[in-house]
């Protein structure tokens, strides 16, 4: 799947929003990718996961034993990546602010894990989720995401395989352009923002 094909999937599902958004990273943007919309069609989610799985090197795919995704944003694509790779897929969640395994999910000591996200901007959620897997005894050997919004600057401590890089500008609160500063910011994601 080429970049234009991926963008066509986002456009077809009306998942590319325009306005003034406060991202979970705390930064502001005039664009937001609502991955939940692109993933609400099971066939589209399956196509995107198959394309993302194909980006992983063959040797890496052979090593993997489990897929883990952070809730909420990564749950659907994580599940679809598990299907595409023929692996169990579980998720970590933050009932008290820190990612942890719940719902009877386990990671065996030394399990080779693929972390899967919908969108990576600063990598904060990914690094926190990776830490939870490590604390449970697993070893995250790579991360995959539908979208890399980091501008190629994110360091997750493991190899990173995004399906597409989309680099809309983001701004700190004190550097907003006038057109964004003139409108209230919307918090479109599910994560509380500081």
Image (cartoon, helix red, strand yellow):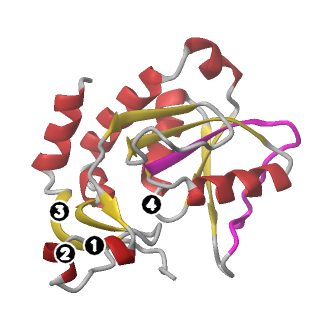
What whole-number distance in Å separates the C-alpha atoms at marks 4 and 3? 16 Å
Do the residues bearing badges 3 and 2 touch, measured as CB atoms within 8 Å? no
Q: Badge 4: how crowded within 10 Å, few (<14), some, or many (20+)?
A: some
> Pointer 4: what residue?
73
Q: Between residues 131 and 40, which one lies in front from this camera angle?
A: 131
What whole-number distance in Å separates the C-alpha atoms at marks 2 and 4? 25 Å
Residue 32 position (above or below residue 118):
below
In magenta stretch: residue 36: no
Q: Quadrant of the N terminus?
A: top left
Q: Between residues 189 and 184, which one lies in front from this camera angle?
A: 184
Which image quarter: residue 121?
bottom left
Q: Left or right: where does residue 125 sit relative to residue 18?
A: right
Which image quarter: residue 15?
bottom left
> Pointer 1: what residue?
176
What whole-number distance in Å separates the C-alpha atoms at marks 3 and 1? 18 Å
**Residue at (58%, 59%) from the top-left corner?**
124
Q: Between residues 77 and 8, which one lies in front from this camera angle?
A: 8
> Pointer 2: what residue?
180
Q: Badge 2: how crowded within 10 Å, few (<14), some, or many (20+)?
A: some
> Pointer 3: what residue?
17
What whole-number distance in Å separates the C-alpha atoms at marks 1 and 2? 6 Å
The local secondary structure at tag 4 comes to loop
Magenta range is 98-119
- Residue 89 is labelled as none
Give the image location of residue 144, x and y in percent: 51, 37
Residue 112 position (above or below residue 75):
above
Q: Left or right: where does residue 137 sit relative to residue 169?
A: right
Do the residues bearing badges 1 and 2 touch, measured as CB atoms within 8 Å? yes
Which residue occupies the extreme top position in the image?
A: 59
Give the image location of residue 84, x and y in percent: 46, 30
The local secondary structure at tag 1 comes to loop
């Amino acid at each position: 799947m080429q970049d234009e094909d991926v963008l066509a999937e986002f456009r077809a599902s009306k998942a590319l929003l325009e306005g003034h958004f406060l991202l979970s990273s705390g930064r502001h943007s005039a664009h937001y990718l609502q991955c939940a919309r692109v993933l609400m069609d099971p066939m589209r989610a399956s196509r995107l996961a198959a394309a993302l799985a194909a980006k992983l090197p063959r040797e890496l795919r052979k090593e993997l034993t489990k897929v883990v995704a952070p809730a909420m944003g990564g749950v659907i694509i994580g599940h679809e990546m598990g299907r595409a790779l023929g692996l169990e897929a579980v998720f970590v969640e933050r009932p008290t602010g820190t990612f942890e395994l719940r719902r009877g999910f386990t990671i065996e000591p030394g399990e080779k894990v693929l972390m899967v996200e919908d969108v990576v901007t600063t990598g904060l959620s990914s690094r926190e989720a990776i830490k939870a897997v490590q604390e449970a005894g697993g070893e995250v050997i790579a991360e995959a995401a539908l979208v890399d919004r980091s501008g190629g600057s994110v360091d997750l401590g493991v190899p990173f395989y995004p399906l597409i890089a989309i680099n809309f500008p983001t701004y700190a609160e004190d550097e907003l352009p006038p057109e964004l500063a003139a409108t209230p910011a919307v918090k479109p994601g599910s994560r509380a923002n500081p």
